């Protein structure tokens, strides 16, 4: 007997059928997912690798075990810079890192992580969640079968550790510095020699004079690296990485294949991690900086204004040239630039005025 015919004969109406259909998913055994996540970070790296581990734990809690993620640090399953390809190919379901590592895939990726003299963490979050940032990021990653999500920010980084003073832009001439990405291109534009060094070798290279300077992250991570034992001067601010954003990425087929509730949980957990990460940096960097100054006698120096102005000028040309390499990069750059102008105009009378007129004058003096 046909089901419809049977129901009719049994006197069960359409409403009852609909109710059964609506209730049905609850009794169907829920599918379980076992995922692997690869990261670009060394094992146990505070906040960053910790954040990936924390994310996996939260996902297991929030989904009541429906999604379990096993996390692999850089090199444990794939090389640190193999994350993008591994998730793109579906070798693993998800990964985490920073989008500027993938400039070779498309130069547009860099805008989703750090642009010299670009947006700070607050501005980046506003661009992603309040404007076009995340939509453009999704558009950039879609051809690679990837879904990106903002994963947190380091906040404003430090300018770096120097064994030579930077009194004028000319002091960059011949300076050997470890500084990746667009910032490195700017330093090269100023006459410096950019040296690419793996994280584990930076300290030794700085100590032996193979390099004169290096940037890393901020006080918390820099203290841990022990750079104060190998360099004299600690410069600020980190003009090259004003609010570096981190990312989660998911294989698009895997993400699109999830039930809507699990997609929503993933999205929410990413936002939670985004807030958690920035909060760790913001709450711990200040104390680490004080330790560097008072315990390790680090000399803290602000880049002179004319050095900043010179680097800014070079940055504009370098960022424009980078944007011209690809139509997607151009599209992202134009949107970023317009957004920075708008938010900057507002920031000048909100955040900047608050810092200059309130924090500097009163809060820090209290
Ligand atoms: Ca850095």
Image (spheres, grey):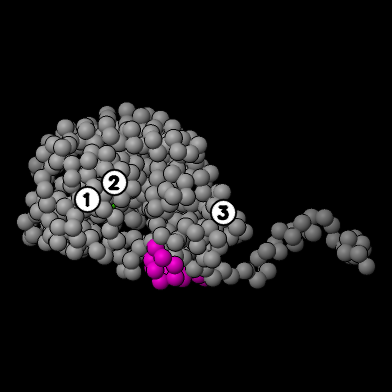
Q: Which quadrant is the C terminus positioned in?
A: top left
Residues packed near mark 1 inside 10 Å, few (<14), some (14 to 19) or many (20 plus): many
Q: Circle 1 — which element?
A: strand
- Of callouts 2 and 1, the N-terminal one: 1
Residue 64 on image: x %, y %: 51, 69
Q: Is residue 176 visible?
A: yes
Q: Position of residue 309 (x, y in %)?
A: 21, 32
Circles 2 and 1: CB atoms closer than 8 Å:
yes
At a point 46% along the width and 65% down the height, the residue shown is 37
Left or right of 105, for residue 354:
left
- Determine the image quadrant of residue 110: top left
The residue carrying mark 1 is: 177
Residue contact between numbered discs 1 and 3, judged by CB atoms under 8 Å: no
Does 11 appear in magenta? Answer: no
At x 16% / y 32%, what residue is drawn?
Answer: 306
* Cα distance in 3D space between marks 1 and 3: 35 Å
What residue is drawn where x is 16% and y is 33%?
305
Specify the segment rendered in magenta.
64-80
Q: Image check: 351 left or right of 272?
A: left
Residue 119 in percent (x, y) is at: 33, 39
In the picture, the disc for residue 145 is: 3
Mark 3 burial class by Cα count in 10 Å: few <14, some 14-19, many 20+: some
Left-right relation of 144 to 299: right
> Distance of mark 2 from mark 1, alpha carbons?
8 Å
In the picture shown, does residue 52 fall above or below 361?
below
Q: Is residue 304 visible?
A: no
Q: Count the labels in the image.
A: 3
Q: Which mark is residue 169?
A: none
Q: Earlier in the sequence, mark 1 or mark 3?
A: 3
Q: Which residue is tagged 2?
A: 184
């Amino acid at each position: 007997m046909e089901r419809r015919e049977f129901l009719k004969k049994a006197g069960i109406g359409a409403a009852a059928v609909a109710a059964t259909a609506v209730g049905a998913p609850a009794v169907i055994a829920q599918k379980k997912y076992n995922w692997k996540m690869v990261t670009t970070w060394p094992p146990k790296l505070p906040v960053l690798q910790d954040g990936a581990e924390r994310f996996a734990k939260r996902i297991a809690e929030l989904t009541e075990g429906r999604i379990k993620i096993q996390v692999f640090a850089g090199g444990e399953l794939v090389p640190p810079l193999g994350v993008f390809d591994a998730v793109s190919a579906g070798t693993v379901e998800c990964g985490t890192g920073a989008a500027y590592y993938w400039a070779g895939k498309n130069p547009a990726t860099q805008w989703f992580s750090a642009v010299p003299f670009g947006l700070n963490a607050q501005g980046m979050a506003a661009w992603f969640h309040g404007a076009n940032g995340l939509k453009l990021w999704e558009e950039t990653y879609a051809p690679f079968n990837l879904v990106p999500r903002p994963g947190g920010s380091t906040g404003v980084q430090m300018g770096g550790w120097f064994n030579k003073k930077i009194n004028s832009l000319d002091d960059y001439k011949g300076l050997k510095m470890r500084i990746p990405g667009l910032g490195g291109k700017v330093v090269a534009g100023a006459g410096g020699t950019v040296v690419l060094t793996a994280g584990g070798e930076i300290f030794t290279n700085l100590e032996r004079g193979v390099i004169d300077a290096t940037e890393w992250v901020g006080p918390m991570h820099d203290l841990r690296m022990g750079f104060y034992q190998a360099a004299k001067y600690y410069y600020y601010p980190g003009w090259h990485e004003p609010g570096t954003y981190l990312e989660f990425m998911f294989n698009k087929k895997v993400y699109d294949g999830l039930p809507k509730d699990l997609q929503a949980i993933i999205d929410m957990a990413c936002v939670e991690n985004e807030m958690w990460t920035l909060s760790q940096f913001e709450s711990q960097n200040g104390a680490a900086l004080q330790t560097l100054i008072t315990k390790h006698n680090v000399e803290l120096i602000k880049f002179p204004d004319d050095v900043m102005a010179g680097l800014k000028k070079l940055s504009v040309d370098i960022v424009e040239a980078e944007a011209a390499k690809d139509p997607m990069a151009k599209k992202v750059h134009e949107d970023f630039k317009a957004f920075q102008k708008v938010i900057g105009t507002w920031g000048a009378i909100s955040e900047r005025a608050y810092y200059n007129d309130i924090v500097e004058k009163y809060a820090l003096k209290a």
